[in-house]
Amino acid sequence: MKLTPKAIVVQKFGKNAQFTVDEVQDVVQNGCPGLAIPQKGPCLYRCSLQLPEFSVVSETFKKKKDAEQSAAEKALEKLGIDPSPNVPSAEEAWDKLIASVKHLFSNEFLSSQSPLRGHFIAALRRDGDLYGSVPASVIAVCDSKLANLCKLINPKVESSHLLVLTYIMRAATRLSEFVVTSEGQLSLWRKDPYPPEIIESSIIRQSESPDSICIEAIHIPSSLEMAVHPVTLNVSSTGYYLDVIARTLDQTDGNKILVSRTIGKASSEMRLYFAAPKSYLLDLSSDLPNVEEVVDFEGSLNPRASHLYGQDIYGDAILASIGYTRKSEGLFHEDITLQSYYRMLIHLTPSGVYKLSREAILTAELPMAFTTRTNWRGSFPREMLFMFCRQHWLSEPVFSTCSNSLKESSESSRFYEKSAALESAETGKECTSGDGTAASDNVRCEVKIFSKSRDPILECSPKEFYKKQNESIENASLKVLSWLNAYFKDPDIPLEKLNNLVGALDIQCYPQNFFKKFSSYRFIHNVQQRKMGEKLLQANSINMLNAIPEHGIYCLSIGGPDSGIYPSNGCLSFISYSVSLLIEGETMKELLESREEFEFEMGTGAVIPQVEVVTTQMSVGQSTCFCKELPPQELILAAADDSARIFSLLSSGACCLEYHITLLRVTEPPEDRMEQALFSPPLSKQRVEYALQHIKESCATTLVDFGCGSGSLLDSLLDYPTALEKIVGVDISQKSLSRAAKIIHSKLSKKLDAAVPCTDVKSAVLYDGSVTVFDSRLHGFDIGTCLEVIEHMEEDEASQFGNIVLSSFRPRILIVSTPNYEYNAILQKSSSTIQEDDPDEKTQLQSCKFRNHDHKFEWTRDQFNCWATELAARHNYSVEFSGVGGSGDREPGFASQIAVFRSRSPPEEDDLLKDGDSAHHYKVIWEWDGNGLSRSSL
């Protein structure tokens, strides 16, 4: 076992080694132009180590234990001590393996606490020729020391469970005076009988077990045409459970059974049991330890068992949780149900890991984006990636981080932790600068995944940089999980589509190694898809009224009064829901899943698409019901408490799922919460009021809102008398446009009620399209608005938008607002105070964050002024600057900065379209005319 540097120092010097850790304050500049506020940086630690003859001081680290290890490492370097472990050679490991096998058959071993002890005692209760016979397979999987020695002899042991058997059997042949082996038999005997008193005392210790134990297990046939089904193992107190499992698999005794490593949690005893190959040729006479196995398997590959185990299994298999442990004197056992089997199956996919962590198998979905740790729910991406690799018997993922100043490091959960990477990545230190202080530069992270035999499987090299190392690691992990999830959803995905996905997620796949590892899942998926296709309700048998077929939503109904409070991207939505199985021709429903309260972040794909689409159309307090087609069968059976009954119902006829959802409440996105905490009315309302004032003053009759989102501005305009006759909104999010259509339609329809003050709006249209693409139908409007939109684009796209809107759309007036980056210190409740005495001292939060995770940039006043001034000059517009929130006369200016562009060209010149500019690139999503008639393509 590898000792850390600190452990080596303590082992050598004991109390004479004095570790003293001090906190170090660091000041880090945030790099924001024009701002310089000294602020307390991250909490760092430095360690001083005093030894009898000298002392050393570590560099600074974010964790105390890392500083201690660094100091210890420096001390060992001065002492000339190499902290790396003394790894035995293959020959030394071979000698130790022989000695370890010999110890297993000693008198002392029967009184040890090893889990193997139970198997040796059970072997003494076997009858006839099997008396005292211990299956070599249990020795191979229950003694980790033996397995580790075999890895040192031959690293290929990691990817082959049978190679361990080879070495244990061959080691036993070197012990002919103590151990008996038989050619072609995978079992070992002690040559001389145990003393009677040892046998008697050992068996008495287990005599309190009940006469018979009934254990529920799962039978996994090798044929995918046969269903997985439960079996009962009847194990008597005088028998050996491995013999019972052997008979269930039509084998004569447990010596012919192979046992897998534990499945799932390492602390569990859940294992796969399957028949050993009838012809297992072992060269037991060779003296060379590094040999290959020669196996002649009979029977077909078992794809489901192989997928669970991560290595090939042939023939039928039994999944059971049974065995001997250090903690229990007798036989440990737990029942395994069909539900637990299917939960294990979906736990092998990234999406399944997330669904189980949320306890929402039929509702949750692996999110597409990692926004903030505060908004994330369920297991974090890095944690899930480690879990995925363990489940599939892969090496632990290796994370390499580097800052934009090209300092590199490797990330690990502990400072000194052995890496399983191909290149033997060093232990994980935080990025540090030359003087040892933590680097404040933006960080990006690369991830590499290898097989146990160290073949490369995947690499992810994101281009994005993040403020924190943890954020870069979580985002890189999520990219890998997203790519893996796409494959597991469709293993037959066309190569071209897979390559496109690889590029989009910055993934490099090694196809030969990847498909070799996950080939068994393709067989499982294809059979499941074929069977599920037979059970789906056909579209013509479902009520298509109130349907959104492009999202797979049918029979949609929303009830309850409209509260006017709608969820938006970035907010947390809280819902209660239930999911039931509906069977064609049956009135009874089978409840599969329900939650009294379930929260998720809107706009990240954290729930299945149907739930998010429907939730966007609801206001708080409303309820909805809809139907959707069946998901993969394993998800339904993993969610159902009585999986056997649900399986029979699925087999009885065509089915679908019915969802009932109530929107309980929503919390505003972090940006809105920050703004509302400081401003009354909220900053968003102030922006609308600012735009409204200019609309009134300009007497505009036509308005286009670029990036209208859910229609908050257009909705607000309808509450005030203006000269507007036509209003238009453009956005690229159909979900937001759908919500906007609902809100605006409801308000415009009130025009028909004479008791309600009506507006002069005669036409309203919502378009689906990008604001960086020109559409001639929006040319020459009186006024254009673009409120808090450009920061959601890349900076080059924001420049492209500015050029297109002023050169092609050419509104007479254009109002653009965007966050003032310099104001974030106040919004984020900085501990710094505004220094009013010296206006040149501008305040700013150290390491200032953007207000929204989706913001690609946020500009200072100088940057925004430069962008707007250059645009105006280039396209013959004037520009004036203002803002809302705060004051333009005091630092750091307005919270939301605004530029108002006014065309200098004559109106008749603005109305002229350039040749070739008459194309219609936008899609009409919804439109309304003055007669109260509306048309929607949603």
Image: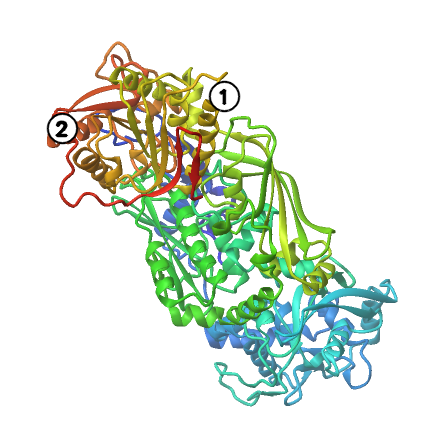
Where residue 404 sits, quadrant-wise, is: top left
Contact check, label 2 and label 1, Cβ < 8 Å: no
Front residue of 363/108: it is: 363
Question: What kind of element bears circle 1?
Answer: loop
Where residue 370 sits, quadrant-wise, is: top left
- Inter-mark Cα distance, 2 to 1: 38 Å
**Tag 1 residue:** 753
Identified at 45% across, 72% down, the residue is: 516
Vertically, is 680 above or below 159? Answer: above
Tell me the kind of residue under disc 2: Glu
Extreme residue in the top direction: 837
Compared across the picture, whether 756 is left or right of 880 comes to right
- Quadrant containing the C terminus is top left
Front residue of 516/5: it is: 516
Q: Position of residue 815 (x, y in %)?
A: 26, 25
Where residue 53 sits, quadrant-wise, is: top left
Q: Position of residue 650 (x, y in %)?
A: 67, 61
Vertically, is 584 above or below 787? Answer: below
The label number, if any, that marks residue 908 in the structure image: 2
Compared across the picture, whether 501 is left or right of 639 comes to left
Q: Position of residue 876 (x, y in %)?
A: 11, 28
Front residue of 544/84: it is: 544
